[in-house]
């Protein structure tokens, strides 16, 4: 990090989990180092929890620091503490009004919205002078122009604050995401984008004043319309606040939409373009560098003129250095959300990463089965979650490890169901011992848990990949085959296309590898990050973790052993095993006769034999040859068997310690 900072570089360091990437940023006395060039260091974190953990590390290390807080954390009015006493132009509670203005409503800055509300309330609010503004006093530099502190801690959203980026050393911890997925119900809806563009077209008295007309003429590349939307129009900040359909991003989105629709589509019938968004529309900013006050707005639009995705990426080109840290980075995502000039700076070989994980961190990983098992949508949960198998794994882990097992990560759509399974095996407060995919980065609650379980993965679907391909001008299409139901002629199941997605979710074209990297960047990287929540204190004696992962989207370099899918007991198997539980020794004949009355179709002796054979193969039973009546073989359990099924791991079923190396 120091070398990259000294070189004034723009780099992405794939630092392994628990290698100290966050700690180094938080605990270094940066003001004493020549590497900073005498400029401030700003450490941006993915979540407030990660930020607060870093603040604690700075405090413990004795380095000087400053924390910047979001509006709901620091502004009493935005937090709703004065809703009864503050009047708003719309009559809504003050907290709702501010959050609406700073979000989807109009996209104004907090300082602009705050100033407007002050004026509406006679020039002052109960929180005046508000800490949301005073927290920037003397930050990032003091009166002499020197760094005010060793490190400034804030979340990713503070990358939009120009003074924190201009000629500073920026550390971005974990991959930022400055996008709004319109098609998936992100910050912006389709209707909201059309409203803001229409309002802007009317305000600048454009040749057309409706979304439909604008889209049609943009596709025709009308010069008169191009000149109008690309002209820098003067507009007062108040207009964005008072006009309910306006939004501060509307000028840039309108320009980007025109550029996109007037350009040829890619092979996936998507258009994309980028336009600058100038913050000086909202506040007076004096800066020599034109990049100081702008962001880059990128839009992706489909063949039906529907906006699929919008990125509003902060301009980081005027930072002195940018150092991105991520254990499992996706370069296409980082390029889109940070900048194209970002370079990958590898630190370790794959072999070194593996040895670090196993012997320094003490993390060992067992993969269960060989399927991806996405569970990020209602369809995926229905077809790939398999609650019976998940229940079996949870029961098995609790049977083997008792109280050493209590921590689970699962997709958000099934998290509550998983918590119920945990309650069934008497795990106390399961809601405190689960995480879901997407919230795992930089989380440390499971760092000293000896056993863990990660089930299923999240899958972004093709649209997620195709939008990023379009935004970056990459050429790849989903690999498809003829629909097996209609043979390629078109039917209801294939949407009339005659094609369906090929097994394996691959891509074709010159940039197929980039497309696959984008897909893996969300699917595999989230799984890898989930696994990395355990054993996060390398070198600490006695701290080892064994994590079971029920998806094959985990990176191969993380997997020490792969075992089969769990065995879910069928009704007759369950009955035979229950009989064996109640009888210390039993023969096939005795078991058959003891359970066959439970089933109308009876029970075959061979069925009992196969059940007991599987128990032996799983390491929980044994056979004694010829010791029973009339020389029959006898069977007995040698280990506890969970209620609904078993996992085939004989060594652990014989109670091997989870802290011993595999």
Image (tube, grey):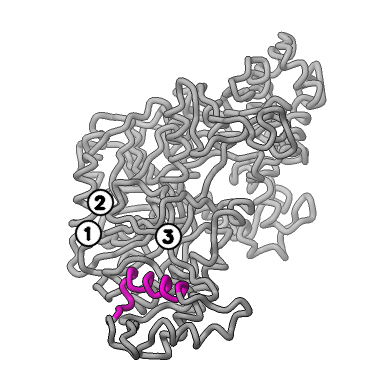
Closest to the camera, between mark 2 and mark 3, is 3
Q: Which circle's residue, 2 or 3, is located before the other in the chain?
A: 2
Disc assigned to residue 565: 3
Question: Where 210 falls versus 585 (above or below)?
Answer: above
- Residue at point 72%, 37% (across, down): 190
Horizontal arrangement in the rendering, residue 623 relative to residue 552 (left or right): left
Image quadrant in which the N terminus is located: top left
Of the 4 image quadrants, the one containing the C terminus is: bottom left
Q: CA distance from mark 2 to mark 3?
A: 32 Å
When asked about the image quadrant of residue 617, the answer is: bottom left
Which residue is at a point 55% across and 30% down the rendered structure image?
Answer: 478
Q: Residues within 10 Å of mark 2 (few under 14, many from 20)?
A: some
Give, as a single range, the part of the protein colored magenta.
606-623
Q: Which residue is identified by label 2?
A: 19
Chain-order first, disc 2 or disc 1: 2
The tag earlier along the polypeptide, 3 or 1, is 1
In the picture of the structure, the residue carrying the numbered disc 1 is 538
Mark in front: 3 vs 1: 3
The answer to whether residue 480 of the structure is visible from this angle is yes
């Amino acid at each position: 990090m120091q070398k990259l900072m000294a070189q004034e570089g723009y780099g992405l360091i794939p630092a392994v989990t628990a290698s100290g990437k966050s700690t180094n940023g938080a605990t270094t006395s940066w003001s004493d180092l020549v590497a900073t060039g005498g400029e401030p260091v700003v450490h941006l974190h993915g979540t407030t929890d990660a930020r607060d953990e870093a603040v604690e590390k700075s405090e413990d290390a004795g380095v000087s620091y400053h924390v910047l807080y979001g509006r709901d954390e620091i502004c009493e009015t935005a937090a709703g503490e004065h809703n009864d006493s503050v009047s708003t132009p719309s009559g809504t509670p003050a907290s709702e009004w501010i959050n609406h203005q700073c979000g989807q409503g109009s996209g104004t800055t907090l300082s602009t919205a705050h100033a407007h509300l002050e004026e509406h309330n006679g020039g002052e609010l109960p929180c005046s002078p508000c800490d949301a503004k005073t927290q920037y006093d003397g930050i990032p530099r003091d009166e002499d122009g020197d760094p005010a502190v060793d490190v400034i801690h804030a979340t990713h959203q503070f990358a939009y604050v120009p003074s924190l980026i201009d000629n500073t050393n920026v550390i971005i911890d974990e991959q930022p995401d400055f996008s709004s997925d319109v098609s998936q119900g992100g910050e912006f809806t389709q209707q909201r984008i059309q409203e803001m563009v229409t309002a802007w077209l009317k305000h600048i008295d454009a040749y057309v004043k409706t979304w439909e007309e604008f889209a049609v003429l943009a596709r025709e590349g009308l010069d008169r319309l191009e000149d109008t939307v690309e002209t820098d129009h003067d507009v007062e900040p108040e207009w964005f606040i008072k006009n309910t359909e306006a939004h501060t991003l509307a000028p840039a989105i309108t320009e980007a939409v025109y550029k996109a629709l007037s350009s040829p589509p890619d092979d996936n019938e998507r258009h994309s373009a980028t336009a600058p968004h100038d913050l000086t529309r909202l506040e007076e900013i004096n800066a020599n560098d034109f990049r100081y006050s702008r962001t880059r707005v990128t839009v992706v639009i489909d063949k039906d003129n529907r906006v699929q995705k919008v990125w509003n990426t902060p301009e980081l080109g005027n930072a002195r250095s940018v150092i991105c840290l991520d254990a499992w980075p996706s370069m296409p995502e980082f390029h889109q959300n940070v900048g194209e000039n970002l370079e990958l700076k590898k630190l370790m070989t794959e072999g070194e990463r593996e040895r670090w994980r196993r012997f320094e961190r003490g993390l060992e990983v067992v993969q269960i089965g060989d399927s991806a098992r996405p569970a990020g949508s209602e369809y995926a949960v229905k077809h790939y979650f398999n609650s019976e198998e998940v229940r079996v794994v949870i029961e098995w882990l609790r049977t083997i490890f008792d109280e050493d097992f209590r921590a689970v990560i699962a997709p958000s759509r099934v998290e509550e169901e998983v918590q119920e399974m945990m309650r069934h095996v008497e795990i106390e407060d399961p809601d405190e011992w689960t995480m879901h995919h997407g919230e795992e980065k930089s989380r440390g609650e499971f760092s000293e848990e000896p056993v863990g379980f990660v089930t299923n993965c999240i899958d972004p679907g093709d649209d997620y990949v195709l939008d990023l391909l379009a935004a970056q001008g990459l050429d790849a299409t989903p690999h498809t085959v003829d629909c097996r139901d209609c043979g390629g002629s078109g039917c209801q199941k294939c949407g009339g296309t005659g094609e369906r997605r090929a097994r394996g979710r691959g891509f074709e074209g010159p940039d197929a590898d980039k497309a696959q990297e984008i897909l893996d960047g969300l699917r595999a990287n989230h799984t890898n990050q989930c696994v990395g929540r355990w054993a996060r204190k390398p070198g600490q004696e006695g701290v080892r973790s064994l994590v079971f992962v029920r998806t094959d989207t985990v990176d191969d370099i993380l997997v020490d052993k792969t075992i089969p899918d769990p065995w879910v007991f069928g009704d007759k198997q369950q009955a035979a095993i229950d009989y064996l539980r109640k009888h210390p020794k039993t023969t096939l004949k005795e078991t058959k006769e003891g359970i066959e009355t439970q089933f109308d179709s009876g029970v075959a002796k061979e069925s009992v034999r196969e059940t007991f054979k599987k128990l032996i193969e799983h390491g929980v039973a044994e056979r004694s040859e010829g010791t029973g009546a009339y020389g029959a073989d006898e069977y007995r359990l040698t280990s506890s068997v969970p209620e609904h099924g078993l996992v085939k791991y004989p060594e652990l079923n014989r109670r091997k310690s989870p802290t011993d190396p595999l």
